[in-house]
Amino acid sequence: MRRKIKLILILCISILGILGLSSCGKEQPKNTVFSVDDLKGKTIGVQMGTTGDVYASEYEEDGSGTKVERFHKGVDAVTSLKQGKLDCVIIDEQPAEAFVRNNEDIEILEEDFALEEYAAVISKKNPELLKQVNEALMALFKDGTINKIIHNYIPDETTGETVPFHYEQAVMTGEPLRIATNATFPPYEYYEGGEIVGIDIDIAKAVADKLGRVVVVSDIEFDAIINAVSSGKADMGLAGFTVTDERKERISFTEPYATSKQVIIVRNGKANDFWGNLQKKMYDTLVKDGRWKFLLKGLGNTMLITICALLIGCCVGFLLAMVRVAHDKNGSFKVLDLIAKIYITIIRGTPMMVQLLIIYYVIFASVDLNKVVVAIIAFGINSSAYLAEVIRSGVMSIDPGQFEAGRSLGLGFGTMMRSVILPQALKNVLPAIGNEFISLLKETSIAGYIGLLDLTKGGDIIQSLTYEPLIPLLLVAAIYLLLVIIFTALVNKLERRLKRNER
């Protein structure tokens, strides 16, 4: 075990070395975009579902050969730009400035791409809340609170300075005002000290005070926020939403509360010194502000979901397998066998991501369940279909003569299965169950799409804070690999012990 752990560490260091040497020796791609007029025929990176995505799509449809590559996070688009895979990135001004501050090899063009206004989104089914929020925003504009909040994060255009002001919510008890956001968009929403802060969060707290409610913030993918609000999983979405006609068809917008710009990020030709910044990158990734806690908490949720989902999968899968075995051997349970076949076909025939989203946004749309519980149910249902076939195949692999011998001794089907068949079958399928655990462990990496902090989501949060994807991704990959190696060793040990018992 210790040897395998050492191999993982050596592998990670080797990967860092290879990437560092390649970045040092590789010639930096030259910039190809110098103005808005140069966008035609280029490859443009955008964050999926943003206004930049909408505007860039117009170039994609004009026949000029422009390609638009869409990313879930702006930092992923910027990383691709730095690697020469994109010609430019179109994104909101404030996060663009944060990217440039943390990456010396990119810059923002002086020419603005587009002007826009930000507003909150509220379900069309909730016009009363829309009216209340608009009234609250008007009152906050009138007393200057919103301007104070904005200029605490963004310099005033007149003075060029920020004015310290942090809004603390006064109402601490009452009905929750559930806010959906995507905390990768500084200074509007981002993580600081383990909590989500920013302009939108402070405005949400100020609005909640006016309504006598308490803010509860959920961090989910940007392109899932409107779905969350429409389905009732969140009361309001705040994530720098620009009002567009297409969005108006699905969601209601509040009065605008801020103005911003879409800008173009390009390469500036400077080299990025990987090794020179490695120590600082490691510090920023793990030590600064206790960011290692995101990985630790995410790991805890990942293990909890995986273990509980596997237990559910084993219990439900066992029942499904017994129904199918009983039908195959005795011809009984015809209706239940048909239901089991349909269940297994549907679950195994649809992606886990789709199942998770359906369970969260459709089945439990009106139920306020803990997200960990929702994930356990979703992954447990998915796992049960696979384990049902694993267990069934193990039972059917037993020599038919043993079934006949059991019948000749007068054993009932249940007694024969419990005392003779299942002990042998479980030994045969133990490796397959171990493989299902490993697959389940890795599949939980999609839990972040419903705003749940798992191991992968923890790495994404750190990446959004450091604007450096390599080290967080390697750490997350190393943790997954270590967990797989440990569990594989435990399963192998159990297999050896079971074989010794056979002797």
Image (spheres, rainbow, N blue to C red):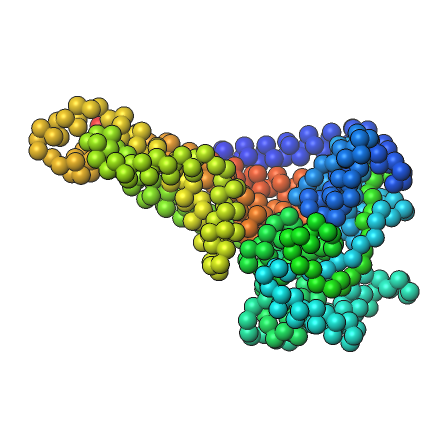
The image shows a total of numbered marks equal to 0
Residue at 64% in and 53% down: 250
348 on left or right of 463: left
Name the spot of residue 228 as percent of width and height, x first: 58, 54
Residue at 59% in and 33% down: 10
Res 297 visible: yes
Relative height, residue 108 to residue 6 (above, below): below
Most extreme residue toward the left is 409
Name the spot of residue 457 as percent of width and height, x first: 58, 48
Name the spot of residue 445 as percent of width and height, x first: 54, 43
Residue at 27% in and 25% down: 397
Relative height, residue 202 to residue 139 (above, below): above
Res 179 visible: no
Q: Nearer the viewer, residue 90 or 230?
A: 230
Q: Quadrant of residue 343?
A: top left
Q: Nearer the viewer, residue 74 or 128?
A: 128
Q: Quadrant of the N terminus?
A: top left
Residue at 32% in and 44% down: 315
Q: Nearer the viewer, residue 32 or 16?
A: 32
Name the spot of residue 241 as percent of width and height, x first: 71, 55
424 on left or right of 292: left
Q: Quadrant of residue 503?
A: top left
